[in-house]
Image (spheres, grey):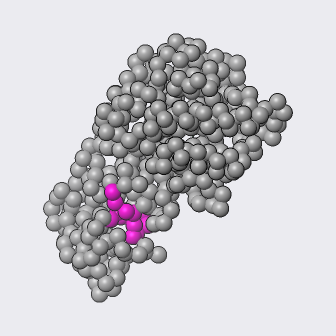
Amino acid sequence: MDQRFGMFIHWGPVTLRGTEIGWSRGHEVPVEDYDNLYKEFNPVLFDADAWVKTAKDAGMKYLTIISKHHDGFCLWPTKFSDYNIMNSPYKKDIVGELASSCKKYDIKFCVYFTVLDWHDPNYPIHSSSYPPSNDLDPKANMNKFVRTMENELQEIVTRYHPYMLWFDGNWESPWKNEYAVDIYKFLKRLDPNVIINNRLGASTEHSKLTSKTVGDFVTPEQKIGELDMNTPWETCMTICNQWAWKPNDTMKTLKQCVQTLAKTAGGNGSLLFNVGPMSDGRMEVRQVKRLKEMGEWLKIYGESIYGTKGGPFKPNELFAATRKGDKLYIHVFEKKSGTLTLPAIACIKVKQAYLLKGDKINYTQDAGGAVTLQFPEQLPDSNDSVIVLELNANAETIPVAS
Ligand code: FHN
């Protein structure tokens, strides 16, 4: 959770069509076509170091690569399915190359792994639909399917030693929580330190803990999670709209990107920000540029994100707050007027206030503890200017303001 910001990468042969990974199978792309795209998949411009360097320059601390998505195609040389990268013209271990590059650039290497697999004959559902189809294939065999899953996960954990495993596709009826509990224990036996998200347990609820949750943190999707000081959470979100690459897809502005990160950290959560590389192996230049711009912001303001806690104030359109030790960081998104009055922080005194890496800020604090900040004529950053309040106590102990 202290890492706060990671790269998510959705990629595969589907990028040859620019449609959504998994879900376009049997819809925009007929199944027969989709399942044979790997025979044309040859991303000769793929450069693992370039992808990892893009993450590093963005200020990201971890990277999560799709090893297998709902379409069943494996981006690593697995012994347990012929439907893998070594049977494509490309014939290189994408997952392995990214694992080595992450090590080289000190980026924590993480792996996405789908539970459901519409391509595997032993998984009873073979078509992408939501709500899921109830037409279960009687010839399928879930026990064999779960064993294949264990074998493939053993390959991934013992070969690439992922820091975190990001499961997904846990909402269809063939998947039972018993399988999830067994797999969770199996993985923690393989590597007690591996972190596992909450999409292993059989559930459609991703944003909060439930009695059936199997995993270590919750995963709101395409929205910023609620402020929560107890349950670890990580929002996953696309820098464009589609998870896999789509030509001319709408890309988020720098203000949207920076404020999404700050509001996520302000909610005490982390952001897993998704990029969909192209079929030739390159990430779009405009997306790399946008990520670099986020990195420029973090070079100045990173102290107010990495290793901080969220709160005590709820993030909103005007500001969010993060905290570490005796420092409270106010992320100012918009200057509606010349001042900003914060909810009262009882019995705690503000010793001084200043722009992070900048000038002093004038402020008053009333008897009830409410602080009013005097904004300078011009705020240094129109996307998010950070004001530091040094307190006479540990900011992390302040209860969340109701
Ligand atoms: O179906 C997937 C989708 O393709 C994508 O992988 C996202 C990423 O979190 N998860 C699922 C939708 O909830």
Horizontal and vertical percent position of residue 140: 78, 32
Which residue reaches farthest right? Answer: 138
In magenta, the rendered stretch is 307-323
Horizontal and vertical percent position of residue 296: 26, 43
- Does 310 lie within the magenta span? yes
Residue 80, by quadrant, is top right
Q: In the rendered image, is residue 20 in sight?
A: no
- Of residues 136 and 258, the one drawn nearer to the viewer in this rendering: 136
Identified at 73% across, 38% down, the residue is: 143
Horizontal and vertical percent position of residue 166: 53, 43
- Does 34 lie within the magenta span? no
Identified at 34% across, 78% down, the residue is: 345
Q: Is residue 266 above or below residue 381?
A: below
Q: In the rendered image, is residue 303 in sight?
A: yes
Identified at 28% across, 47% down, the residue is: 297
- Of residues 324 and 390, the one drawn nearer to the viewer in this rendering: 324
- Left or right relative to 102: residue 279: right
Q: Is residue 287 above or below residue 194?
A: above
- Of residues 290 and 16, the one drawn nearer to the viewer in this rendering: 16
Quadrant (top left, top right, bottom left, bottom right) of the N terminus: bottom left
- Left or right relative to 121: residue 353: left
Identified at 25% across, 63% down, the residue is: 387
